[in-house]
Image (cartoon, rainbow, N blue to C red):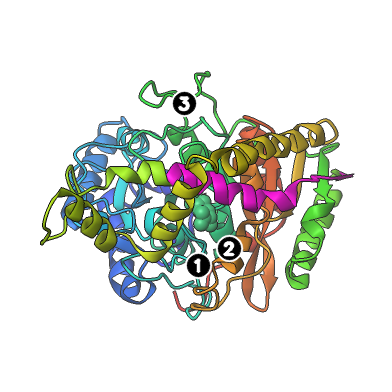
């Protein structure tokens, strides 16, 4: 059984199809591992073994009936930001601690239709605000590579679950880096798709113009199979893009001869830890051996991406989170004098410090007199940031650089310094502001800790990015490495 947990999704699918293992057996193996490791790692907030095993049973029946699809019977962990009918869905918040979702998110529906098994809901920063998973109401998550360190965030539970092989693959969401930064810190492959490719329906909103769901898995090939399930037009999301379904595995084996890789000088400057830079450079050397050409490019507005994001994201969050008022659903204060007092106490009790900080910033930048100075200005610079990428993609096919400026940091190290925490996303946030796709693949280690290589693609160029990731994973084995003691 120990071998099974490091298998690719394709291998697992073949084992299920050939009846070497049943979905119930595979699911039980993961549940057993979760029982053993989760009390310490804290990757999952909610498990519901009855529901999970019922899905596994149904998958076995479907396989027996010859109606299996690629992911039928495979146990997938779902970030606790996705509403799943009948499942507690907390978004990492006390506000939603006892919220049972009455309907399925689009993403959940897609996995259900494919016959995948929902293994449980994973831990995350509260309302996806954070880079270390330390803002979760349900406690921090430990990085399986070094349990004194953070897994990254906000999709820290999914990240630890993939790294510790507590699921076959997982979902995440990325508003400013929450798939790619934890992928870098935990040593696996994560992809944030082009904005609009994956429906946000039923995905609890943080910053709606930036939020995007994506796969977190061991390899690029696994991510391609996951994206095949997740992507698709959905009329219930007004920003869902109506384009034909694609097979993201179609270009995996294309040769990379002649691929033009842009290296932005701003991504290799001050702020990047030297050891991380060295690993990223070595990965780029590997791409040269595969026939790629290097092009020096510039993304001149990179430094502005964090200040712009911390105006726009809180502005949208303050609006999105106004719905948690104690009236419709979620937490309500027990004692209050009148309606206003009920609102105030409910929100004071229900939200954690980071969420409150964002609501305060957001309402401030949207208020009369400040709107033009902050929010409008930020939107204008956002456009310039997107234009930087448009210019760059005239010279190259993909852009490469680090996904995060450092390896996993110690739990508590940045918890009291929001600005230091915000800087974790210096290489990822601009991609969200531009609506582009980005991924992180394991590129090596520094002092025993994983380092990710970021691959940024042009709009809807996910198939090429996955090809670029897969080619590297054919000549390296970083993505197959597992932490000790798991
Ligand atoms: N770390 C960033 C933030 O705190 C991004 C989070 C995310 O992508 N959800 O907002």
* Helix, strand or loop status at disc 2: loop
For marks 1 and 2 on the same chain, the one whose residue lies earlier in the sequence: 1
Image x and y of residue 308, in percent: 62, 47
Q: Is 412 on the left-hand or right-hand side of 49?
A: right
Residue identifier under label 3: 240
Write the start and end of the magenta stretch as one range.
294-317
Report if residue 467 is visible in the image. no
The answer to whether the residues at label 2 and label 3 have Cβ atoms under 8 Å apart is: no
Q: Is 75 on the left-hand or right-hand side of 469?
A: left
Quarter of the figure that contains the C terminus: bottom left
Image point 48% across, 49% down: which residue?
364
- Look at the image and say whether residue 308 sits in the magenta stretch: yes
Image x and y of residue 467, in percent: 67, 39
Which residue occupies the foreground of this view, 329 or 54?
Answer: 329
Report the disc number at residue 151. 1
Residue at the far bottom in the pictured view: 148
């Amino acid at each position: 059984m120990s071998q099974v947990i490091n298998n690719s999704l394709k291998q697992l699918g073949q084992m299920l199809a050939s009846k070497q293992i049943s979905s119930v057996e595979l699911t039980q193996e993961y549940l057993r591992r979760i029982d053993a490791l989760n009390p310490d790692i804290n990757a999952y907030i909610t498990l519901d073994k009855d529901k999970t095993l019922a899905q596994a049973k149904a998958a076995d029946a479907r396989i027996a009936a010859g109606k299996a699809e690629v992911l039928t019977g495979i146990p997938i962990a779902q970030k606790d930001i996705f509403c799943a009918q009948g499942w507690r869905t907390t978004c990492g918040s006390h506000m939603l601690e006892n919220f049972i979702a009455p309907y399925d998110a689009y993403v959940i529906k897609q996995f259900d239709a494919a016959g995948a098994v929902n293994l449980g809901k994973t831990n995350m920063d509260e309302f996806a605000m954070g880079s270390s998973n330390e803002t979760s109401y349900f406690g921090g998550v430990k990085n399986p590579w070094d349990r004194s360190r953070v897994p990254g965030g906000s999709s820290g539970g999914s990240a630890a679950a993939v790294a510790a092989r507590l699921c076959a693959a997982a979902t995440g969401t990325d508003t400013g880096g929450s798939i790619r930064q934890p992928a870098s810190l935990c040593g696996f492959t994560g992809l944030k798709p082009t904005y609009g490719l994956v429906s946000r329906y039923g995905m609890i909103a943080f910053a709606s113009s930036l939020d995007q769901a994506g796969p977190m898995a061991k390899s690029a090939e696994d991510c391609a199979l996951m994206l095949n399930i997740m992507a698709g037009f959905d009329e219930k999301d007004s920003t869902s893009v109506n384009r034909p379904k694609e097979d993201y595995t179609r270009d995996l084996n294309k040769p990379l001869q002649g691929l033009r890789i842009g290296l932005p000088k701003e991504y290799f400057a001050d702020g990047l830890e030297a050891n991380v830079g060295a690993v990223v450079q070595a990965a780029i050397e590997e791409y040269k051996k595969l026939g790629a050409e290097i092009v020096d490019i510039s993304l001149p507005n990179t430094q502005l991406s964090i200040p712009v994001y911390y105006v726009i994201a809180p502005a949208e969050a303050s609006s999105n989170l106004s719905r948690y008022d104690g009236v419709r659903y979620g937490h309500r204060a027990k004692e209050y004098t009148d309606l206003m007092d009920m609102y105030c106490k409910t929100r004071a009790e229900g939200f954690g410090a980071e969420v409150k900080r964002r609501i305060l910033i957001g309402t401030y930048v949207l208020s009369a007199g400040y709107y033009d100075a902050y929010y409008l200005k930020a939107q204008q610079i956002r456009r310039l940031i997107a234009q930087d990428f448009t210019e760059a993609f005239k010279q190259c096919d993909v852009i490469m650089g680090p996904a995060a400026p450092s390896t996993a940091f110690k739990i508590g190290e940045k918890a009291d310094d929001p600005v230091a925490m915000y800087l974790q996303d210096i290489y990822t946030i601009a991609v969200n502001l531009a609506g582009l796709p980005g991924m992180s693949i394991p590129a090596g280690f520094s002092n025993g800790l994983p380092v990710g290589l970021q691959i940024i693609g042009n709009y809807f160029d996910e198939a090429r990015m996955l090809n670029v990731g897969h080619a590297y994973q054919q000549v390296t084995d970083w993505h197959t490495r597992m932490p000790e003691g798991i």
